[in-house]
Amino acid sequence: MSKSGSNHTVTMTDNVTGKTATFPVIHGTAGAPVLDIRTFNKEMGLFTYDPGYTATGSCQSKITFIDGDEGILQYRGYPIEQLAEQSDYMEVCYLLLFGELPSKAEKEKFVYDVSHHTMVHDQINNFFRGFRRDAHPMAVMCGAVGGLAAFYHDSLDIENPWHRTVASYRLIAKLPTIAAMAYKYTVGQPFIYPRNNMGYAENFLHMCFATPAEDYKVDPVVAKALDTIFTLHADHEQNASASTVRLAGSTGANPYACIAAGIAALWGPSHGGANEQVLNMLEEIGTVDKVHDMVKRAKDPDDSFRLFGFGHRVYKNHDPRATVIAKAAHEVLEALGVHDPLLEVAVALEKIALEDEYFIKRRLYPNVDFYSGFILKAMGFPVSMFTALFAIGRTVGWIAQWNELIEDPEQKINRPRQLYTGAAARDFVPLDKR
């Protein structure tokens, strides 16, 4: 390999064929530089092999920056800690969509525009009657969100910036309505229509827990905590669901189909279902006095018991979202007067993780999923709704990624290559001769 001053390049030589080629290195604003291998096959006659694309940059992006070694997460350059503490989800949505924080007038107009798209077409109610009452909310959301394209034909031209904006606002506004309808359907209660005079998180809580029989007042501490959760989950760079949205978008698919694809990817337990696994783990541990024995079991490679909520595929240091969410968890439990014994188990586990050499050496620090389940459980949400709430918060990130893809002149339909390891070429044998 060689570097050449400011024109950073890498020269490669195939020791078998003798072919040599030079490839440029591209430097971004921050983070590791990337090797531009777009002409690699043409120059070397080879494809690269990268299962999971964990060492491959699939696009240029100005939206989110992550430094896993340093525990940094930034939206458009702003640290997640500052946004969670000083901003709110609607402002973060504007930032992710348009690249800058809004002025007071811009934010007011944005909130007004989004809040006046929260209603869904009345015929969408009929969708729900086709599902079983015990259908998983994510299954319902996949169908209902994808079906929005059948109702909003006026915003399907992806080459039209105005159409993309309208579709973006509709998706951000209608996801909470659809998720709340999915929840109400599973518990057998009537749908509650959205209220345009309520905040984003407040409105969602009202749609979930209000009934026609009596007034329901949303606790501001709970609404603030949920708003924070939405902010923390708004985007996370090229994760599995965001990459799925981009891949679907690269085909020219409509935005509703692309977001439905993102929801389907998020549904996977290795992506959006981690906080559910944390609660299941804590329930299996049960009480504080069993923590040390269960940690010992987790260290044993021959034992099937595993700890969830520690470490992260990207963050090799601390998860910057975890500190924020831990504080919110305690505030919500205190405000609601909830005494959850599993929280005591979680605190004991966290203490071990921060002090035990096994965890420290492997950098297994508590992540955002470790505490978020407590908040959602205390709010009254069943475990089946956890991933649906994740999807609500992540919708704006998916939309921002999709918009960036459409506007990127370098993007083309995604078409990964493969290393074929199947049968070699062979002749067909007629059935009577086999």
Image (cartoon, helix red, strand yellow):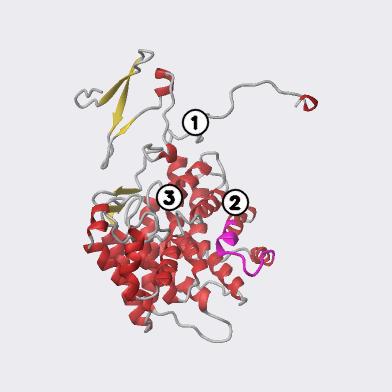
Give the CA separation, mark 2 to mark 3: 20 Å
Q: Are marks 3 and 1 in contact (CB under 8 Å)?
A: no
Q: Identify which amino acid the numbered label 1 is placed on.
A: Arg
Name which quarter of the figure residue 84 lies in. bottom left
Identified at 45% across, 57% down, the residue is 272
Q: Identify which amino acid the numbered label 3 is placed on.
A: Ala
Query: Which of the two labelled residues, at mark 1 and mark 2, occupies the earlier sequence position?
Result: 2
Q: Is residue 105 visible?
A: no
Q: Is residue 252 above or below residue 419?
A: below
Q: Looking at the figure, which quarter contains the C terminus?
A: top right
Question: What residue did someone put label 1 on?
Answer: 417
* Viewer-side residue, 327 vs 356: 356
Q: Which mark is residue 400?
A: 3
Range drawn in magenta: 130-142
Within 10 angstroms of label 1, few (less than 14), some, or many (20 or more) residues? few
* Viewer-side residue, 170 vs 109: 170
Residue, far top: 18
Q: Position of residue 94 (x, y in %)?
A: 38, 57
Foreground mark, 1 or 2, reads 1
Residue 139 among magenta residues: yes
Question: What residue did someone put label 2 on?
Answer: 154
The local secondary structure at tag 1 comes to: loop
* Viewer-side residue, 417 vs 98: 417
Give the CA separation, mark 3 to mark 1: 27 Å
Q: Is residue 251 above or below residue 400?
A: above
Residue, far left: 5
Residue 378 among magenta residues: no
Residue, far bottom: 214
Name which quarter of the figure residue 147 lies in. bottom right
